[in-house]
Image (spheres, rainbow, N blue to C red):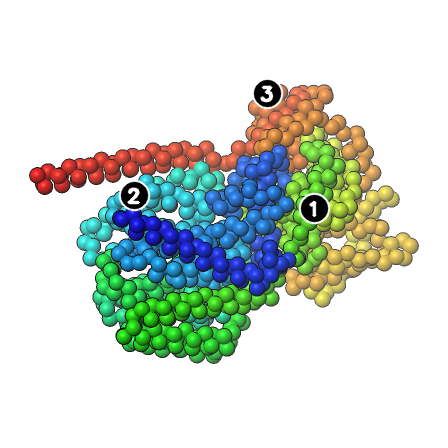
Amino acid sequence: MPTALRHHRILSASTAAVLTLAVHLLVMRRRQIVPFGETTRGVGDYGPQYVPFHHALSQILHGSEQIGLDFNWLSGGGVAFLPDYTTYLASPFALMVGLFPPSQTELALTVTILIRLSVAAGAMSLLLTKLTPWVTPWATLPFAVTYATSAWVFDIAIYTPQWLDGLISFPLLCLAALWCREDRRRLLAILVVAEAWWSNYYTAYMASLGAALFLVLWLATTGVSWLEGLRSVLRFALTGLVGVLLVAPLLVPTALAVANGVPYGRSSLGEVTPRSALVRLLPFTEGVMRTPALAVGTLGLLLALAQPFCSRRPLRQRLVWTGGLAALFGSLLWLPTVMAWNVFDIPNGNPFRFSFVLTGFLVLTAWFCVQDGRLGSVTVLRWPSMLACLAGVGQLMLLTRLANQVQEKQLLIHPSAISAWSLRIGAGVLLVSLVQLRWRKIAALAAAALALLSFVETERSAYFIDTALRIDLGTAPAHDPTARNYQTLASRATSQATWPQGRVSAEAWPREYSWMSYNNPLLRGYPSLPYYSSTLPLAVSETLQGLGVASRANGRMLIDTRDPGLDPLLAVSVRGSDHLLTQTDRLEAFAMVRAVGAAPASAAGLPRPARLRNDLLDEPVYHPAEGIHFSKEPRQNGRLTVGVGETVVATASCAPGQVLQLFIDGGNGLVEWSDASGGKHRMGSFDRRVLTLAPAPRGAIRLSGRSPAGISMTPGGLACLDSSSLAQQVSSMETPLIDVDGASIHAQFAQPIRGSIIVATTAQRGWTCSLDGREVPVEPRSGLLGVHADGRSELSCSYHTPGLRTGLALGALAAILAMAYWWAGRRRDRVRAAATRAEGD
């Protein structure tokens, strides 16, 4: 390739990136999104997951004793972090958060989002110029920008930054497929696959399927023999396999974590109607997370619709690419193919996350519409004929009319904007087609003006989509410019808790925002129990729920609330009186590591959480309540459900000095009671598993269901907590010297321990422990990490991510295979070159 042409390609790709950046900055400026205002991007999981996880990565990059790539002491009482890294952070762009101070994580994440989108446009520009190497690369600009500003970006991905790596991966993997077709750049192709799967395995899988389809369609329309086509496909498959195996050190542990993670529960793929999907091809439509986002702008859509009618291109090519596009569109409508796109699993949320592949094919098809001749040998770009443009405009008008007629709950449509922009763009396309018959240069200028008009449409459509999303999903509270102050408060609370001897916890945000605050320990940087992750181990969730920690989302959101019976057992020694930790209370709690004797015998009839808590102590502190009676009989399994609008009256009492606690399984209800002095009290069960009824009830306790599912009580339901006995055991406890070093915890007792040693973290798979330097088996106690001491005094426990060693072995094997494949290819090239020279002689 001539050096000048290569420079033009790089320069045009860079220009596409800059134009994309300009469009997104205009959208942000109009919406007053940070840093142009105080509106956060916090729609969906952006606020509760992506900002906290990126802040965690920032802490790792700046150095932290509380979190590392292998283990995270900040969340869930201690959990593996590598699966979270792979799922939320494994991207070269995410590393940029290390360039910003931790207090500016949201700004850093915004920068990475904009860079990802710009790189996606540049990658698409490189792919388009690769497909037409003998035409000016500057013509790719509107198509590349359209790809990186599609409705999929604004509707789904921009609030889930990791998916944007899939937007980059699709054109790069298509380039890798073309290199496999040419049997060149073998090692680079493998590295491209590896980078895609490292960045985000979920969307990389979807992009890989799209690139495979692209290669098949390209081979079918470029005059390649069946044998050579089969070789190209096999080379791409081998390249993909080796590239994926290179990332095995991340993928294997993450696959195991997902397999052993909390299931999503009741999710449904649902179905999208052909009418809804067709309408979503248009800008100014929004599917409130239930329909596919397919719009690539009116100009891109019109050219894609006109492509089958471009008679200057061979009929076979038009039919094959139109058929491929139709097949992709049909995959949205058939549940088996939707399942295949989603790795044969029912996703939690929008099931059409793969639609970025379809938008990529729409852009490719639109690009083919302005080419003259057979694919692979195009030397001239030419605007489609008047007949083709009329056919495209006619189809666009039909879609516009359909958008004016469809009225579905899962669709938000701006009919007047659709009609207005359809007329403008349609008229512009016809005008360019008419002008090109006599004035080619004027037609080129008119086409450029049309592209700029299309960018304006994109900005207007993005504003509509963002507004509709915020109305339907809600957003996090306004951007907080004093994040550094909050981190200072968290650091002060952590010191107050004398970490690693004790933990910190705080109430969730106000009710309407509560689910957005479950990763606040990650966001602020203090060791605690709340945690929200798609890779949360089921064993961790079940252990903490079993002890009485509340949860949502089928157990993927762990919620810590004030509980005088559990706080001391989980080493919560400082609790915030508010969610900001501006006010903190010092609590008497056991240390993170402590010695305990044999589990005491619990009385019959106690709720399971109360029994599990007793098992963590030398002496029981929970006792059955006296005089328990419910006005409604529990079910045969002992569980009592109070339906919405229903009220159940209960009576129970405790011995003097004890506190009555109500244990529930879930739902939302209201508990009302009166104390001995006649004072009336009420407490909601929202985001709680244990309600402490203090002051002690006198007489009836009224339970009312408030959610559709009502409120359900644990079998047994009520128990009495002997707070004085618990406080006495805490005060008599020996506090060892405790040290936390990454994924390891060490404790040194003054005297040899008889009985067991408990660490206030869950006994998840991956822990190994030793006493006085000799490895001992892990013996969980109520699900917490424990060992039998047997007269020893020094405990050391280390966490090793399950599957990491297998992944490292597979990654090393893949590296060897990659080098062998590269060496064999180079040797084959030398043999061919020698044979060619011999024939020439």
Say if 41 sits above or below 76 in the image: below
* Residue 780 image offset from top left, x and y in percent: 62, 34
> Which labelled disc corresponds to residue 185?
2
Q: Position of residue 344 (x, y in %)?
A: 43, 54
Residue type marked 1? Tyr
Image coordinates of residue 515 in percent, x first then y, are: 64, 54
Q: Nearer the viewer, residue 808 or 630?
A: 808
Picture layout, residue 275 above or below residue 187: below
Check disc 3 and report its element: helix, strand or loop: loop
Classify residue 655 as left or right of residue 147.
right
Residue occupying the point 36% across, 73% down: 429
Q: CA distance from mark 2 to mark 1?
A: 50 Å
At x 39%, y 39%, the residue is 246
Q: Which mark is residue 415?
A: none
Residue 481 visible in the picture: yes
Q: Nearer the viewer, mark 1 or mark 3?
A: 1
Q: How would you rate the neighbour count of disc 1 (Cα within 10 Å): few for under 14, some for 14-19, many for 20 or more?
A: some
The image position of residue 821, as x and y in percent, is 28, 37
Tag 3 or tag 1, which sits nearer the N-term?
Answer: 1
**Horizontal side, residue 671 vs residue 286: left or right:** right
The residue singled out by tag 3 in the image is 773
Amino acid type at circle 3 is Gly
Q: Which mark is residue 486?
A: 1
Q: Foreground residue, 79 or 385?
A: 385
> Mark 1 to mark 3: distance in Å?
41 Å
Could you give the CA–CA distance between mark 2 and mark 3, rounded to whole angstroms? 51 Å
Q: Nearer the viewer, residue 612 or 125?
A: 125
